[in-house]
Amino acid sequence: MTFGQSLELFAGEYLGAAVLRFLAGTGRMRVSGYERYQALRAGSRGTILALWHRELFAGVYAFRSLSIRMIVSQHFDGELITRVIRHFGYSTARGSTTRGGVRALVELIKAVEVGEAVGFTPDGPRGPRCKAQMGVVYLAQRTGRPIVPLGCMPRDYWVLNSWDRFIVPKPRTRIGVVYGDPVIVPPDKASLEECRSRLEQALNAAMEQAEQLAREA
């Protein structure tokens, strides 16, 4: 890593954390379905959480109390994300579908087995947008734990011109937070594609429910 990249990461880390804390932190959260997550965590059982990449900005703040280990890519932008989210209580496993993915998946299997909460943005790091990749489904199959689809949508927001149409909440807006119905992945490998498709549907539903919750009076 060059000196310029190190300086960019240092500035981006602290500026990113401050901007996230200001924009998402001034929002008014409205939460639905948290009791489902609590039931799955009973007895400190490991859990798997999934959120679309475009909802990550507000999501980092909304789910900061859950002590999540996130899978984050080994690319430069992944390093920046890692540095920013650690300010909000997250730890990371580094890897993606293109680099380091097997090692990260093994690390997450071990984390779930010892009772940790682990998190995925299943369409990251490069898309296609809102199309789930298989990593989170494999993890659920290997550990026997369900996937909790999350939604986190502000009422008022900016949309960036990025591959995922990344959402940045405006200050003091209402933010809908949804814990959806768990997606169960059976041990039968023949059902993996069906489960991946159901996860996509569940994540889209959670995103839509979160946006509706944010817009309700």
Image (spheres, rainbow, N blue to C red):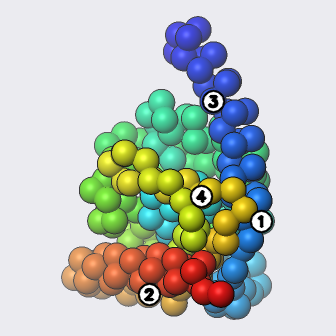
Q: Nearer the viewer, residue 69 or 62?
A: 62
Badge 2 is on which residue?
Answer: 184
Examine the rendered structure and indicate whether residue 67 appears above or below residue 33: above
Q: Nearer the viewer, residue 217 or 20?
A: 217
| Foreground disc of the pair 3, 2 | 3
Badge 1 is on which residue?
Answer: 65
Spatial CA distance of label 1 from label 2 is: 24 Å
Badge 3 is on which residue?
Answer: 12
| Foreground disc of the pair 1, 2 | 1
- Dot 4 falls on a residue whose secondary structure is strand
Left or right: 89, with 175 as reference point: right
Q: Nearer the viewer, residue 122 or 10?
A: 10
Left or right: 63, with 216 as reference point: right
Mark yes or no: residue 40 visible. Answer: no
Counting residues from the start of the chain, the first of labels 3 and 2 encountered is 3
Spatial CA distance of label 3 from label 2 is: 38 Å
Disc 3 vs disc 1: Cβ atoms closer than 8 Å?
A: no
Residue 69 sits in which quadrant? bottom right
Counting residues from the start of the chain, the first of labels 1 and 4 encountered is 1
Badge 4 is on which residue?
Answer: 169
Q: Amino acid at mark 2?
A: Ile
Residue 25 position within the rendered picture, expressed as x and y whole percent measured from the top left: 76, 58
